[in-house]
Amino acid sequence: MHLQYVAVHHSLQRQRIGTVLMGAAIDDFYEVAVRTGIFALTLTAIDQKTSDFYRKLGFIDFGAEGATQPNLFLPAATVIEARKKLDAALVG
C-alpha cells in the first residue's frame, strides 16, 4: 500500500496536525493489513526533514541512501503488534 501525498500548510505545521493525519492513515493501513495480509505501507518523503518525521512514526528507509526524496516503509507487523499492545493495555 502506498501513501501518495499528505501535506500540512506551512503556517499550520508544528501543531500536531500531520501526526493526527498520519495516525488516521496508519489506522486505515492497519485495517487493510489485517484483512489482506499486505506487507507494508510505503511513501516518499518530500525532503530529509519530512523523512525524520516519518521515522519518528516508525517508518524505515529503503532504496538509495542519501536520496533528496527518501523512500520509507512501515511494516504491517509493526502496526499490528502496536495495536495488540494498545488493545491489551486498554482492556487490562
Image (tube, rainbow, N blue to C red):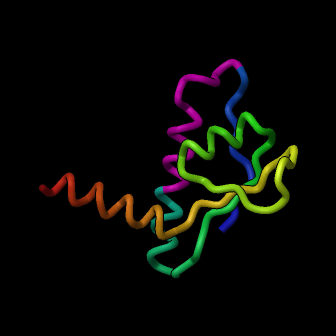
* Picture quarter with the C terminus: bottom left
Q: Is residue 28 left or right of residue 91?
A: right
Tell me the residue at 66%/39% (across/down): 52
Give the percent coordinates (x, y) of residue 58: 54, 51
User: Is 57 situated above or below 83?
Assistant: above
Q: Which residues are magenta?
A: 11-26
Q: Is residue 53 visible?
A: yes
**How would you classify the magenta stretch by its main secondary structure?**
helix
Q: Position of residue 59 (x, y in %)?
A: 60, 53
Q: Residue at the location (59% across, 36% down)? A: 18
User: In percent of the image, x 69 and y 63: which residue is there?
Assistant: 2
31 part of magenta stretch:
no
Out of 12 and 70, give the one closest to the viewer: 70
**x then y, percent, for residue 35:** 46, 79
Q: In the picture provided, is 5 more to the left or to the right than 30? A: right
| Frontmost residue, 78 versus 65 | 65
